[in-house]
Amino acid sequence: MAPIAPDTGLIKTAWRCKCPRCGTGDLYHPGFSMRVRDVCPQCDLNLSAHDSADGPAVFLIFILGFLLVPLALAAELVFAPPLWAHALGTGILALGLTLGSLRPLKAYVIALQYKHRPETME
């Protein structure tokens, strides 16, 4: 089995959105994009064979729902803000958390695929 990113763990590599094999090549195209590169620019790992599908988005739905609903209920009990403030505050928080964590979570799923099935990515 091929080594996983020298001196780094899967989570650290995924958080930085780097290649699961070398740990230095960028996983995504430049800019605010969710498109994974076809090949790692550093180690030439074939990244086009990955398939993270909707897994990262489903994980985020469950995790953020589990976190944000109790938070909104607590805010209602403590502050009793108007409905528009709930919608605005929770909407901005949910959007920020989703956009901030979707790329690293997708990178983590790709790294897990590489760790457990490296032959499909070589």
Image (spheres, grey):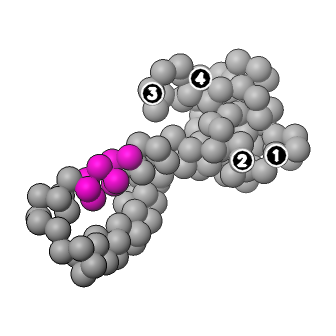
Q: Residues within 10 Å of mark 3 (few under 14, many from 20)?
A: few
Q: Is residue 49 magenta?
A: no
* Position of 17 relative to 84 (above/below): above
At 11% from the left edge and 64% from the top edge, which residue is drawn?
83
When asked about the image quadrant of residue 82, the answer is: bottom left
Magenta stretch, main secondary structure class = helix
Is residue 117 in sight in this rendering? no
When asked about the image quadrant of residue 5, the answer is: top right
First-in-chain label (4 vs 3): 3
Residue 8 is marked as: 1
* Position of 98 relative to 30 (above/below): below
At 47% from the left edge and 52% from the top edge, which residue is drawn?
56
Check disc 4 and report the residue beneath it.
38
Evaluate if marks 2 and 4 touch, with contact meaning CB atoms under 8 Å apart. no
Residue 33 is marked as: 3
Label 1, label 3: how far apart the Cα atoms are? 24 Å
Q: Give 38 or 13, whichever is nearer the viewer.
A: 13
Q: Nearer the viewer, mark 2 or mark 4?
A: 2
Mark 4 element type: loop
Check disc 2 and report the residue beneath it.
12
Q: Give 58 or 93, whichever is nearer the viewer.
A: 93
